[in-house]
Every structure is written in C-alpha cells, then in structure tokens.
Amino acid sequence: MTDLYQHFREEERGFIEKVLEWKEFAETSYSPRLTDFLDPREQEILRSVIGEQKEVRAAFHGGAEHAERKRALIYPDYMKPEAEDFSLSVFKVVYPSKFVTIEHRHVLGSLMSIGLKRAKYGDILIENGGIQIVAAAEMDDFLRLQLTEIGKTKVELEQISLAEVYEKVEEWNEFSATVSSLRLDAVLSAIYQLSRPKVLPLIQAGHVKVNWRIAEQGSMECREGDVLSVRGYGRSKISGINGRTKKDKLRLTYGRQK
C-alpha cells in the first residue's frame, strides 16, 4: 500500500483512498460502483489504482469519445458496461443566439450560482453558438427547474441524445524550453514567457491550476504529465523532462493548447 502512494502527490491521497473503497465495494458486492464526474487526472489515478485486474475493471464515459470530464464505472469482470450504465444526460441550451453571446465562463458561473456541484456535470460544449451541457441523470429535474437564466439571458433546456453531443478534439502545439528547476513558478515563467514577479501574483490570486487543482505554492515541484492552466493565458502540458544542458539547466518539452 505504501508503494502505491509513492507514485502520487500527497494531496492526492484522499482521492486514492476513495478509489480503494469503490474497488472494495465492487469486489465484495459483485456489483458496479458509478462515480461522479472525474477530471482527467482523477481518471488517470483511478486507472492506476484499479490496474489490469481480472476481478474488477473500470470504464469511463463523458458523453463523447474525447470528453474531458467523465464518470467512471468500477465493475466486476462478469459485466459488460453499456452507455446507459453511466446515467448521463445531455441538455441543449435554447436561447436567442442571434442576439446574445454566451461563453463557457457564463454557463459555468450560472451552474455554480444554482448550487450544482462540479462533480455532477461534465463538459460544457460550445460550437457555433450552440451550447450543450453533459450532466448526471440524477440531476435532470434540478437542472430543468433551476437553470432558467445564464447571466441575464432567459434560457430553456432541451434534452438531446448522446449521439448529438459535440465532439471536442484537443489540439496541442509542441515547444521546448530550459528551466533552472522544476518549481512551478520557474516552469510557468518559461512556458508562458512571464517574469517570475508576474507569475507569483497569479498563483497567490488562485489563477493557476495544476492537474485541475488550484496551486497555492510557487515552490511546488512539477512532474512529467502535469497539466497546467493559468487564467487568461491558457492551458499547457509537460510532455517531457529530458535531462540537463551543459549549464546544468533542465530540458523541458511541453504542449500549448491551440
């Protein structure tokens, strides 16, 4: 068990313990355990903890193949998961799109304002003015009753099928840089071409996330595979840490989202 925790950050320990509980439930009850929506890092941890075991397996669904946030189904090996086992609903937001512009942040803010927990809905998809919300089916009635406005715009929700969900494909541009250390402030400075004095206030204001969690310390050490996001500057991913230069700096390869 100690060996398992060594592969992850200390702050991820609580989630790992949840996964172990879900796994034990599926093993002992011979029945599936459906989670709320998980971000990609949580999905990665769950895959690692469940592993390639014969008794218990894990599957994920977020409405579309390339969904970012997905529900996980931890299930005994006799079972073959179907789409309906993930209890997903998809709503199309009906609003006067010819006259009003609604952005992702507006939808997110409105969902927060009605008290819907982030774990109860998945991706918010926007394409050519069309807006779709993937949510847990158990929240259908609540969403229909409560989400009547986004910003100051009156809206209605129309349920649609999973076949109609927008397909979102992430595209990344690859870059390289050298850094003096893997401290978060140093890595952000290199990736976003910001001075360290400009990076620190962004961290202190809660505008920086590492693996979908707000980063509180510039001294936090980054790792290969970490996804970083800075409000107003976009998202990046550390794809490789490739040794040191002659001047003893670390070679970093990273992607920036297009």
Image (cartoon, rainbow, N blue to C red):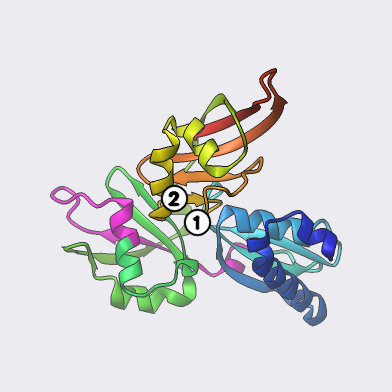
Is 92 colored magenta in this rendering? yes
Q: Which residue lies at the image location 45% right of the left edge and 37% below the top edge?
A: 196
Q: Which comes sooner in the sequence, label 1 or label 2?
A: 2
Q: Can residue 111 be seen in this view?
A: yes
Instruction: Please report the bounds of the magenta region as a residue range.
Output: 82-108
Left or right, 76 with respect to 174, comes to: right
Question: Element under label 2?
Answer: helix
Of 191 and 73, which appears nearest the observer? 191
Q: Position of residue 258 (x, y in %)?
A: 44, 32
Vertical position of residue 13 compared to residue 256: above or below: below
Q: Is disc 1 in contact with disc 2, using a CB cutoff of under 8 Å?
A: yes
Residue at (44% x, 71% y) in the render: 117
Q: Nearer the viewer, residue 202 or 61?
A: 202
Callout 1 secondary element: loop
Rendering coords of residue 168 (x, y %): 47, 44
Most foreground residue, 116 or 221: 221
Q: CA separation, marks 1 and 2?
A: 6 Å
Please say whether residue 167 is visible from this viewpoint.
Answer: no
Answer above or below: position of 6 versus 167: below
Vertical placement of residue 242 versus 98, above or below: above
Q: In this view, does 52 lie to the left or right of 168?
A: right
Looking at the rendered structure, the kind of residue marked 2 is: Ile
- How packed mark 2 is, by other alpha carbons closer than 10 Å (few <14, some 14-19, many 20 or more), is many
Q: Name the residue under label 2.
A: 203
Marker disc for residue 216: 1
